[in-house]
């Protein structure tokens, strides 16, 4: 303690359970500043997950399907997650099976670009499916 007062620095207890307790003489404010700086740098390096959505109807035409599939490929190649969903309007909810077939067809055609994270699941008037991009080696 005398040495830390003499150097005008702080005495910080590193390991209190050790016998004898381990202490270090440092500038505590500088230590906190550097720790925050390190955390900020780690946070900046962390990858942010982007989720792109593609909406289909239960009776989506072949041309529209191909057009949307091309966009889905691009999203997966760019590293974004894909949320594909079929929206049932009004009485079209009777075509649940067509919506599921459409999503499963999409999943099988996008197999080389991503893997299905969640199989088609009906939630209210939406049947949703998630596809995650394949990691690049």
Image (cartoon, rainbow, N blue to C red):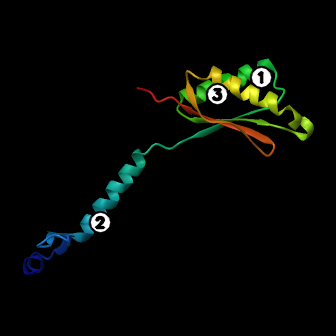
Closest to the observer, 64 or 96: 96
Above or below 10: residue 132: above
At label 3, counting other C-alpha atoms closer than 10 Å, the crowd grade (few under 14, some 14-19, many 20 or more) is many
Q: Nearer the viewer, mark 1 or mark 2?
A: 1
Q: Which mark is residue 64?
A: 1
Where, by quadrant of the figure, is residue 31 drawn? bottom left
Q: Which mark is residue 72?
A: 3
Residue 5 locus on image (x, y percent): 12, 80
Residue on which the image places disc 2:
32
At label 1, counting other C-alpha atoms closer than 10 Å, the crowd grade (few under 14, some 14-19, many 20 or more) is few
Q: Quadrant of the N terminus?
A: bottom left
Above or below 107: residue 42: below
The earlier-in-sequence mark between 3 and 1 is 1
Identity of the residue drawn at 52% across and 32% down: 79
Q: Quadrant of the C terminus?
A: top left
Where, by quadrant of the figure, is residue 89 drawn? top right
The earlier-in-sequence mark between 1 and 2 is 2
């Amino acid at each position: 303690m005398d040495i830390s007062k003499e150097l005008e620095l702080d005495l910080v207890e590193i390991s209190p359970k050790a016998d004898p307790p381990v202490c270090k003489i440092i500038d505590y404010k500088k230590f906190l500043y550097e720790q925050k700086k390190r955390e900020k740098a780690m946070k900046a390096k962390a990858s942010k997950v982007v989720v792109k959505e593609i909406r289909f109807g239960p009776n989506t035409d072949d041309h529209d399907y191909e057009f949307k599939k091309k966009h889905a490929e691009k999203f997966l190649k760019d590293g974004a997650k894909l949320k594909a969903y079929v929206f049932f309007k009004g009485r079209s909810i009777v075509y649940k099976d067509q919506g599921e077939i459409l999503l499963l067809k999409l999943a099988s055609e996008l197999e080389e670009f991503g893997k299905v994270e969640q199989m088609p699941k009906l939630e209210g008037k939406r049947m949703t499916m998630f596809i995650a991009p394949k990691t690049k080696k």
